[in-house]
Amino acid sequence: MIARTGTGTTLRRLVVLRHAKSAWPEGVADHDRPLAPRGRRDAPAAGRALAESDCLPDLALCSTARRARQTWELASAQWGTPPPVRYDRRLYAADAPDLLAAVREAPPEIATLLLLGHNPGLEELVLDLAGDGLNDTLDRLRTKFPTSAVAVLSWYGPDWSSLAPDAALLTDLLVPRGSKKRR
């Protein structure tokens, strides 16, 4: 549960975005796999969903994998002015402790941070951080954290280095989908 821990705390949000659906072209290394057609439709929908939910980040941390970078480009193109992005090789195939370590390095002036990467690490991180969830969000997340899914965690803290397991509230879980164009 979220609680104020004293003076100097700030409401912070960690927005966790799993990359959109990727393709599996033969002979292409995993790190270099591009988005599939569905992923190219869903990534902009994720960007629109973040804008509609008032969850635009002040900074984004993004895996260097091609599918993650493409997801970022398509999602952030839905916003007037995208925030700065930091591409970090450590986020590719990272587990929950490594992802948390990267999040804890975010500057203290950042109130909303977007983390864009891969499963199973992202799902594990969200479940580790979420001490509680609104409505059925935790149950839905435990069932599946699909491609293009967005989890929003809120917590109070003086800076990102103080983020710890069970410290956040899972306030939202979105699974935006783009629609196929009709011919």
Image (spheres, rainbow, N blue to C red):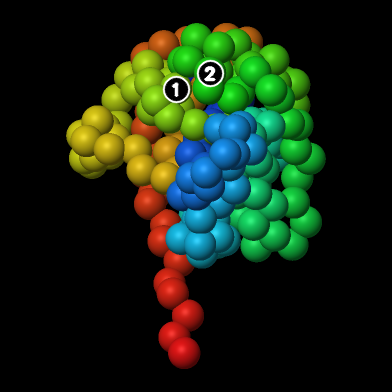
User: Which quarter of the figure is the N terminus placed in?
Assistant: top left
Residue 8's spot in the image, x, y percent?
A: 65, 16
Q: In which quarter of the image is residue 117?
A: top right
Q: Is mark 1 on a helix, strand or loop?
A: helix
Task: Say few, some or many: other residues with alpha carbon within 10 Å of mark 2 (under 14 / 14 to 19 / 20 or more).
Answer: some
> What residue did someone put label 1 on?
121
Is residue 20 among what the camera can see? Answer: no
Q: Which amino acid does label 1 sit on?
A: Gly
Q: Which numbered tag is attached to residue 94?
A: 2
Q: First in sequence: mark 2 or mark 1?
A: 2
Q: Quadrant of residue 63?
A: top right
Residue at the (47%, 80%) spot, across then down: 181
The residue nearer to you, when weighing 11 against 142, is 142
Instruction: Kindly check if marks 2 and 1 are in contact, taking CB atoms under 8 A apart as contact.
Output: yes
Residue at the (59%, 39%) spot, across then down: 28
Q: Which amino acid does label 2 sit on?
A: Ala
Residue 125's spot in the image, x, y percent?
A: 43, 21
Residue at the (71%, 36%) spot, across then down: 59
